Image (cartoon, rainbow, N blue to C red):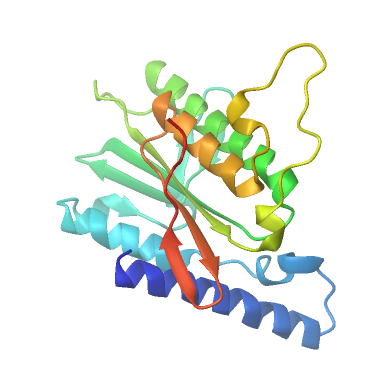
């Protein structure tokens, strides 16, 4: 893993912990790991690295956006969608990127994040097909960065994975929550919902990229 990305991810978890401690000291009562997340901005350093990479790849700095309303795009199944990063070339959309981190409630988040990423990408592709995202004939690249905390809770084999009428995909049988995240990302890439993404796992003092085991 690149050293700047590793430092940003480790710094993200440090900032989450500092925010959690500050909220606890102030008497606020967010639940669990959400105490460090609801302060916001914890993914900004990672977004900044991606922004710099886009500029280094040839995008003009004035056409790479990572702030507020400048990252809003029209949708087809909803009025608008706020992305974390947009890259344009001469006013035409080239890429939209979303960043997410998952640090608790892994069972619920495994399903929610899959639905969000697939839905956002499908909405954006449909908006492009309906000529809502400019006049380019080349579809934009939809990117999704998901950072998952590697901890005992995320390595639990998911409970309640069953289907009353048809068998589930064998890859989900006996899979931990981390495995389920990786299956979702890999399948999204293979179905062209999103472009290649990564799941980064963190344990104390260690960060490494998780290989995608599926197929």
Residue found at x 32% / y 32%: 140
Image x and y of residue 12, in percent: 52, 72
Q: Residue furthest bottom?
A: 25
Which quadrant of the rendered structure holds the N terminus? bottom left
Image x and y of residue 159, in percent: 79, 40
Image x and y of residue 45, in percent: 42, 69
Drawn side of residue 127 relative to residue 25, left or right: left
Q: Is residue 70 above or below residue 6?
A: above
Image x and y of residue 89, in percent: 21, 41
Residue sitting nearer the eye, 86 or 62: 86
Drawn side of residue 182 relative to residue 4, left or right: right
Residue sitting nearer the eye, 53 or 207: 207
Residue found at x 25% / y 39%: 91
Which quadrant of the rendered structure holds the C terminus? top left
Q: Is residue 54 above or below residue 197?
A: below
Residue found at x 39% / y 70%: 6
Q: Quadrant of residue 31?
A: bottom right
Drawn side of residue 6 relative to residue 34, left or right: left
Q: Quadrant of residue 24?
A: bottom right
Q: Residue furthest left?
A: 58
Residue found at x 83% / y 77%: 28
Q: Quadrant of residue 67?
A: bottom left
């Amino acid at each position: 893993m690149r050293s700047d990305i590793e430092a940003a991810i480790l710094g993200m978890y440090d900032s989450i912990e500092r925010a959690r401690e500050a909220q606890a000291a102030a008497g606020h009562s967010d639940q669990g790991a959400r105490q460090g997340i609801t302060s916001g901005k914890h993914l900004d350093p990672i977004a900044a690295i991606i922004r710099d990479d886009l500029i280094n790849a040839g995008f003009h700095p004035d056409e790479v956006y990572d702030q507020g309303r400048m990252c809003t795009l029209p949708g087809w199944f909803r009025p608008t969608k706020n992305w974390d990063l947009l890259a344009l070339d001469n006013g035409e959309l080239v890429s939209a990127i979303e960043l997410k981190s998952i640090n608790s409630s892994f069972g619920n988040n495994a399903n929610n994040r899959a639905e969000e990423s697939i839905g956002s990408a499908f909405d954006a592709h449909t908006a492009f097909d309906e000529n809502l995202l400019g006049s380019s004939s080349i579809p934009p690249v939809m990117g999704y960065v998901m950072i998952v905390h590697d901890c005992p809770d995320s390595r639990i084999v998911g409970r309640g994975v069953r289907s009353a009428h048809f068998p589930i995909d064998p890859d989900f049988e006996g899979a931990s929550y981390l495995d389920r995240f990786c299956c979702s990302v890999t399948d999204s890439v293979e179905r062209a919902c999103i472009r290649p993404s990564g799941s980064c796992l963190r344990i104390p003092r260690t960060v490494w990229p998780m290989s995608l085991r599926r197929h």
